[in-house]
Image (spheres, rainbow, N blue to C red):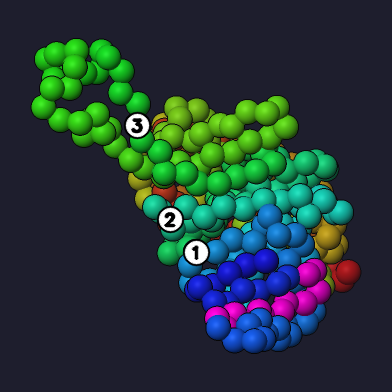
Amino acid sequence: MGRLGTNVGFIFSEDDIVRLDYYPNQTNCFVATMVATEIGSVNHHGIVSDGNNLYFYDKRKGFIKYDGSSFEVISDDIRGTIDGITKGYHNLMVGGYNAEDHSIVWIVPLGTSTAPNYAIRYDIKSKNWGKEDKAARTINYWQAFSDVTWDDFVVLTADAWPTTEAWYYYTSESYNMVFGNTDGQLYIVSTEGKAGANLDGYRVEPILPFCNGITVTRILEIWISFSNTANIDLDFYWRGGDSIGEVRNASWTSLGSINMNSPADPVLYIDQSARLHQLKWGTDLKDEYFSVENIKVGYEGQGRF
């Protein structure tokens, strides 16, 4: 069930949504109205409210935003990712709302996992998505105070006792993501800063039908225009097939790398044939900032499919 305001709630099944209105001081204080069919949430743990809207996962359409009157699909940009949610285990996903940065995080089972193993983050303001390897069976956001030790007080007050201000004066309050799995422990994410670890900075391009979508095409060249130069290698990968499903299930093939210290418009020579093509490029190392103005693909038609 999800709630909007103080007197309105919504009861979800996988296939429909019922609005429940509460009228205080009335004989029949609850009134139920069917508001939607052929849409619903896979479970109640994944229904998240930001106070104005409800967000949930529908097994047919993906992640949905609902304002109480209309529905909006918000996950088209990560269709490839959510198509990888393990079939039959959608009901295990959990979600939470962070009021501090206006984002929602769902923990979902991806790949062949039978338990939630990845955090998918949706920024409500920018409408951008992110993904992180994080296994959890529950997630929430708590307001917590920072820690203050005796050594801190010696530095802050020149004394071992807070003689001029109360204890809480020397602490700060912030929202933190709290999550737990099956080990009986709760864990807290205390920073949104850099962890100092390598990051997956790859960009996955859409599946593209060069020529007319019927002709098999042979990709021979990839030309890159850089906005800046740096001693960074951009890695390129390719996969292809005769159908969208075949492409998505195909493994990535390494095409090699291009160094950003190369002259203007460096080229990567390749030889890959298919009816549908998909490219992935970028870097997976920390502190490697890159900017690309455009990518040009050289190809030739190979005949009818």
What number is the disc on residue 146?
3
Q: Which residues are magenta?
A: 13-24
Q: What amino acid is labelled 1 in the image?
A: Asp
**On the image, numbered disc 2 is attached to which residue?**
99
Estimate the spatial distance between the alpha carbons at disc 1 and disc 2, rounded to whole Å: 7 Å
Q: State the image coordinates of residue 149 (x, y, percent, origin top left).
A: 31, 18
From the viewer's side, name the closer residue of 167 and 245. 167
Q: Residue at x 11, y 15 (%)?
A: 158
Quarter the N terminus occupies: bottom right
Q: Is residue 150 left or right of residue 213?
A: left
Estimate the spatial distance between the alpha carbons at disc 2 and disc 3, rounded to whole Å: 18 Å
Q: Is residue 199 left or right of residue 147?
A: right
Q: Residues within 10 Å of mark 2 (few under 14, many from 20)?
A: few
Q: Residue at x 84, y 64 (%)?
A: 243
The correct choice, above or below, for 139 with respect to 161 in the image is: below
Q: Is residue 130 left or right of residue 193?
A: right
User: Considering only order in the chain, which callout, 1 or 3, is on the residue closer to the N terminus?
Assistant: 1
Say whether residue 163 is visible: yes
**On the image, numbered disc 1 is attached to which residue?**
50
- Quadrant location of residue 76? bottom right
User: Given contact means CB atoms under 8 Å apart, are the residues at marks 1 and 2 in contact?
Assistant: yes
- Quadrant location of residue 154? top left
Q: Residues within 10 Å of mark 3 (few under 14, many from 20)?
A: few
User: Given contact means CB atoms under 8 Å apart, are the residues at marks 2 and 3 in contact?
Assistant: no
Q: What amino acid is labelled 2 in the image?
A: Ala
Q: Residue at x 69, y 63 (%)?
A: 57
Give yes or no for residue 23 being in the magenta stretch: yes
